Amino acid sequence: MAPVAIVTGATSGIGTEIARGLAESGHQLILSCRSVNSGERMLKEIHRTHPQSIISIRNGLELDDLDSVQHWADKIKEELNRSKLKISVLVCNAGLMHAPFKLTKDQIETHMQVNHLSHYLLIRELEELLKGGRVVFTSSSLYKKALKDVPLLCKGPECPDYYEVDNGMQAYAQSKMVMNRCALGLTTIMPDTTFIVTSPGMVRTNLSRNFAARSWTNTFLVNTLWHGLGRFLLHSPTSGAAPGIKASTDINLKSGSYLTQKGLEEFEENCLDQELITEAIKKSDELIKTIRHHSVL
Ligand SMILES: NC(=O)c1ccc[n+]([C@@H]2O[C@H](COP(=O)([O-])OP(=O)(O)OC[C@H]3O[C@@H](n4cnc5c(N)ncnc54)[C@H](OP(=O)(O)O)[C@@H]3O)[C@@H](O)[C@H]2O)c1
């Protein structure tokens, strides 16, 4: 039986190419998508180059809604348990950048919830199925830009001004910092699972869509620089997916590794601070507690 790989955010950019790479390496894929239409488009696209691959889509994963994540995880657990299958690889890849400051219906800042907290909930819910497998995170080197004096993970409308720094870049950096710290924390909490953090470099994808939507000038900049000149200067989605594919398939990588386009790198000291790692895990657990408790009742 082919090993099972789950990829979030596979409808576009880096996620589609990671999925393609995993199909090529013989995985059976479960790809998350928000709508059936976008999922089927992506399915056709991967089947075009890999007609033999075993792929199925599971729609309805809205990462800005913890109830939706819980519901999606429940369906996956039920399905895999019924078929007596484990998860070989879970790629936490979906994400957004440059979105205006907004709280989700769960009262969490949007970048923090979509990029980090929802994936954290997914991992904790799939914990048993992930034993013996690995989790790969598509993080970013921009985690280094996270400010040290801003509360990283909180409920409520705290610090909107900070989050808006650089058109929402600060919110993005914060979410990736917490993602990295939790990945490191999970290496001890879930010792039977391997956790690898990756950074794909600057990749010409749709990630710039929220920046473009902020003004006409931005739209012009994104079209001419990012999608135009970027053809020569930035990574293509295929090349941007390389660290994610290696992290998913190279069994020699140790849990807690950080893989970039240059190979294995060290995390910044600020990311490795044990107290801050423990705090990131504790706050993430607190924020998903009500949802998990709710689903048990
Ligand atoms: N591009 C870069 O230069 C770069 C650099 C460093 C890190 N990254 C990271 O790479 C990852 C993939 O991004 P990308 O560059 O491939 O961008 P992309 O082309 O915009 O793809 C983003 C993916 O995330 C999904 N997504 C966004 N918001 C979601 C939500 N609320 N619920 C469910 N799915 C959602 C999107 O689904 P829809 O199609 O439904 O919108 C899409 O499949 C992100 O985590 C990003 O932070 C990218």
Image: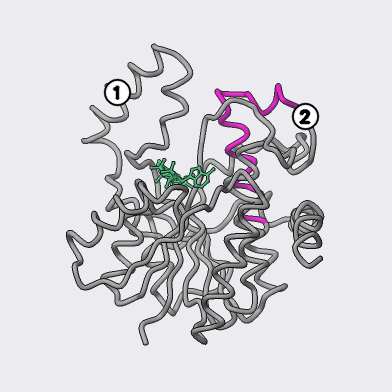
Residue at x 27%, y 21% (from the top left corner): 224
Within 10 Å of the Cα at label 1, are there few (<14), some (14-19), or many (20+) other Cα atoms?
some
Reply above or below: 212 against 295: above
Within 10 Å of the Cα at label 2, are there few (<14), some (14-19), or many (20+) other Cα atoms?
few
Residue 149: within the magenta?
no
Prevailing SS of the magenta stretch: helix
Q: Is mark 2 within 8 Å of ligand 1?
A: no
Residue linked to disc 1: 223
The answer to which of marks 1 and 2 sits earlier in the sequence is 2
Reply above or below: 98 against 176: above
Residue at x 36%, y 47% (from the top left corner): 38
Reply above or below: 179 against 104: below
| Amino acid found under the numbered disc labelled 2 | Pro
Classify mark 2: helix, strand or loop. loop
Which mark is in front, 1 or 2? Answer: 2
Q: Residue furthest top?
A: 216
**Camera-nearest residue between 130 and 81:** 81
Where is residue 112 drawn, in percent x and y? 64, 42
Classify mark 1: helix, strand or loop. helix
Q: Quadrant of residue 165?
A: top right
Residue linked to disc 2: 157
Q: Does residue 147 appear left or right of residue 88 in this picture?
A: right
Where is residue 251 drawn, in percent x and y? 43, 79
Q: Does residue 267 appear left or right of residue 237 in this picture?
A: right
Q: Magenta segment range? A: 159-181
Where is residue 72 drawn, in percent x and y? 57, 60
Where is residue 133 drawn, in percent x and y? 52, 78
| Amino acid found under the numbered disc labelled 1 | Asn
Q: Does residue 62 appear left or right of residue 23 in this picture?
A: right
